[in-house]
Amino acid sequence: MNTKTLVLAVAAGLSFASCTKSIEPLEKKSLLQEEIPGTESMYRENPGSFALISSIDLGNTGAAEISAYDEKTKKLFVVNNSDGNNRIDVLDFSIPSNPVHLTSISVTTYGGFVNSVAARDGFVAAAIEAITKTDAGKVVVFKATDYTAVKVIGVGALPDDIKYSPDGKFIVTANEGEPNSNYSIDPMGTISIISVKDNYQVTTLDFSAFASMEAGLKSRGFRIFGPGASFARDIEPEFIAISSDSKTAWVTLQENNGIAKVNLVHKVITDIFPLGFKNYNMAGNAIDPTDRPLGTISFNQWPVYGVYMPDGIAVLDKVKDDDDDDDEDEDIVLNKGKIPYLFTANEGDAREYTGFAEEARVSSLNLNPAIFPNAAFLKLNENMGRLNITKTLGDTGNDNIFDALYSFGARSFSVWNGNSGQLLFDTKNELEQRVVNAGYYDDDRSDSKGVEPEGITVGTVGKSNLVFVGLERSDAVAIYDVTNPVAPRFLQILATGDAPEGVLFIPAKKSPNKRSLLVVSSENDGQVKVYMPERD
């Protein structure tokens, strides 16, 4: 166990003497509270008081990646690809303080690895890549009761995320379409829309229609850079968020630094939003770009940009209504401004293949002396020298001399206007500062992508909208109040398992114990942890 993991284990107060651990949460009131009109829970809950109530160990690295909850059967379904496994673990979640492993659903007969799961109304849908990942993948729908397969649907190459729409009418997959290792095959990145009530009829969309817009998109920070790839083949859809009315989906295009907007009703991609860049040479955006000397953390402004490159995405289109003149005062209602707020976890991701690698350290580059007169200073390992940047941006003259530097990710979460793609808010360097203050920061990742926000979800606790952000390299989840979506307010940081991958919020009205729950699955140690807020 490394030092960082030990610190987190102590901070979480855990002792894994058995595979399942139940922890009694602290509660301010022991008496049952009266139900509050307009809220989801039988209890008044403090949104800033989430505490660990249980943990279950499902195996080694890769044993707990993405989780999905089925309200009808009160079961939790967890992707498990550890030790050569290729399965979905099924947990009895009827008592959240004591989840129990029931069985596993093997998916080996359907192809390669299972990448994600979604559950609804007694069914669980799995996104499964082909044995050869550049081939078309599959969605397999199982009954959540006896785990028999009811439908197998062909989708695009490498389905990486899967979601049910809130009304249950659609299953949507983001098919990443990654190339093979030598880049001789690069399938199209696509989005598949499956109509559940229409015998699972599937429509798979690609991005060919946007090829003529490539120059304009790239001028605003969109990336098309694979060797010899066409526009449509270079696109790599990553993660999905769906509006509360089930009419619109937004899909992150991580490597491309963009978000796609999809009309689910008409089954068409309507927009691509380039996300631009984050200037780390501005006040509030200071970073620590080096792991040398290891353990020395110093945030300063540096002449480098961050490429947002979000992984996870969530949408909030219901906000607190403070209009005293209507009948829905103080309730969570549909946003009257019709602005869907998109929350992104700006992880960053480099393409690293035998046939193409974009990553390089600043110390290895030729910097334009007119722009970087202190290049020798910047290239020192204790300064910016060890920072990983992309070679695909900044060499404006194509002369192997860099006029600007671009690193991977933004070490933050952001809020975007889902109609226009406009940036409305960014945490700047607050996430990293909070993690340092909590004692969870891993300086070994400073030269790469810092805390690496990866998973993100939103949920409502009482009358507060919250966002939960998984910080992969800090083994933590940050919680913010986003009742005002353009002015998030920090609440707390929770220690998690090693490398939190899946961040799942279960609202009180759907949870087994009628309490708000946060489920975090961590891919490096196979831990699934359950958190619940205290009574207020």
Image (tube, rainbow, N blue to C red):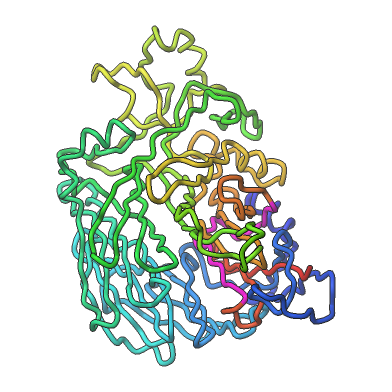
Toward the bottom, the furthest residue is: 146
Q: Which image quarter: residue 34?
A: bottom right
Nearer to the camera, 123 or 445: 123
Residue 385 x/y as whole percent: 48, 23
What residue range appears in magenta?
Answer: 491-508
Residue 114 part of the magenta segment: no
Q: In this view, does 340 lie above or below 139?
A: above
The answer to if 493 sits in the magenta stretch is yes
Name which quarter of the figure residue 362 lies in.
top left
Viewed as shown, does residue 81 lie left or right of 503?
left
Give the quarter of the image for residue 119.
Answer: bottom left
Across the whole image, how many numbered discs are drawn on residues? 0
Q: Is residue 523 visible?
A: no
- Residue 361 rendering spot, x and y as whole percentages: 42, 28
User: Which of these two is toward me, 81 or 220?
Assistant: 220
What secondary structure do most residues of the magenta stretch adopt? strand
Which of these two is toward me, 28 or 435? 28
x and y percentages locating residue 94 in the rendered image: 60, 85
Taking the spot 35% from the left edge, 84% from the top edge, the residue there is 142
Q: In which quarter of the image is the N terminus?
A: bottom right
Q: Which residue is drawn at 35% across and 66% down?
A: 247
Q: Residue at x 37, y 45 (%)?
A: 420
Position of residue 504 relative to residue 236, above or below, is below
Q: Eyeballing the image, is 310 above or below 43?
A: above
Note whether 258 is above or below 282 in the view shown: below
Residue 342 at x, y percent in the picture? 46, 52
**Horizontally, is 58 left or right of 47 in the view?**
left
Quadrant of the rendering where the C terminus is positioned: bottom right
Q: Going by the image, does 155 lie left or right of 11?
A: left
